Image (cartoon, rainbow, N blue to C red):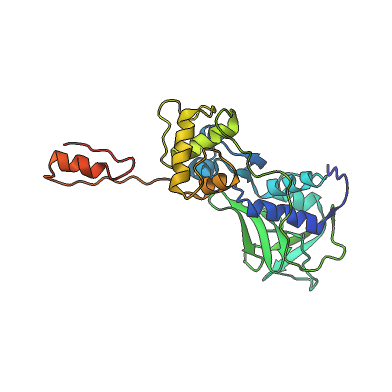
Amino acid sequence: MEGVIRMIKAEDLISKFQYALDNKWGYIWGKSGQMWTQKDQNAASREMTVKYGSRWIGHIVADCSGLFRWAYKQLGGEISHGSNLIYTGHCRSKGKLSGGKRTDGQELKPGTAVFTGTEGDHGHIGLYIGDGFVIEAAGTQQGVIKSKVTASKWTFWGELKAVDYTGSADPAPEAPEDPEPARPTIRKGSKGETVKILQEALIRLGYPLPKYGADGDFGNETLAALKAFQQDNGLNDDGVCGQKTWEKLEDAKPMQLYTVTIPHLPKHEAEALVKNYKESKMMEE
């Protein structure tokens, strides 16, 4: 059942995909615009999710057709979750692609869905946004990315029934204005899932919370760890997690630990050396 409430303008559909790209959405199979948490990751059983899903903790996630489902819902419409279902049930016209061009010689319009696969199986879907590019939820390792429509994997196109292509040229999409912040601002005293996401990120980045862990309660331990992170990353160390701090947390790479063996080093010299390195520990053999 298609269940479309109203026609969607091609440029509005593109803007939603651009929003997901700009905000570094991740990929989790079966999802369509939900926050991925440590609890979700712990419960995962799909091989690629178990292997790579932890990189999307604290990010909004969707799979390739789930991104379409989320965008349609945001714009007052509805579409099936599944690239084959979209190709067979939601395209008013469709055909083959070769080198990024329609084989019938007609223009590939921005807002057109593009597909991989064969006539009987279209296992992946993206959205052509114009200027030779596609936005797609590419996979668990990559998340939402922008790729070239000329890539050989794109073999089919489909103009969507619910999309208004009137006046569709080939403009570069504009970033949408979204009234909601990507993350809520939290501080000491805050509680809930967002606090837990912050705590998990701090622990992953080498700012331990040994007493309480990721308990979803923003107390003194979390405050001290957050201030240390802010200081280390050139932020205002006010202990408040706002948009700039969230962005730094998302971009930061987990701390790597190394073991260094220095034979015959006197104990007092080793202790002095260890003090110069954050989170370092000394082990005697």
* Count of number-bearing discs: 0
Q: Position of residue 113 (x, y in %)?
A: 74, 58
Q: Position of residue 3 (x, y in %)?
A: 85, 42
* Foreground of the two, 221 or 31: 221
Q: Residue at x 50, y 34 (%)?
A: 199
Q: Is residue 44 visible?
A: no
* Foreground of the two, 206 or 118: 206
Q: Residue at x 45, y 25 (%)?
A: 212
Q: Is residue 246 above or below residue 115?
A: above
* Foreground of the two, 170 or 218: 218
Q: Residue at x 86, y 66 (%)?
A: 167
Q: Is residue 108 above or below residue 214?
A: below
Q: Quadrant of residue 175?
A: bottom right
Q: Residue at x 67, y 44 (%)?
A: 181
Q: Position of residue 83 (x, y in %)?
A: 70, 50
180 on left or right of 247: right
102 on left or right of 238: right
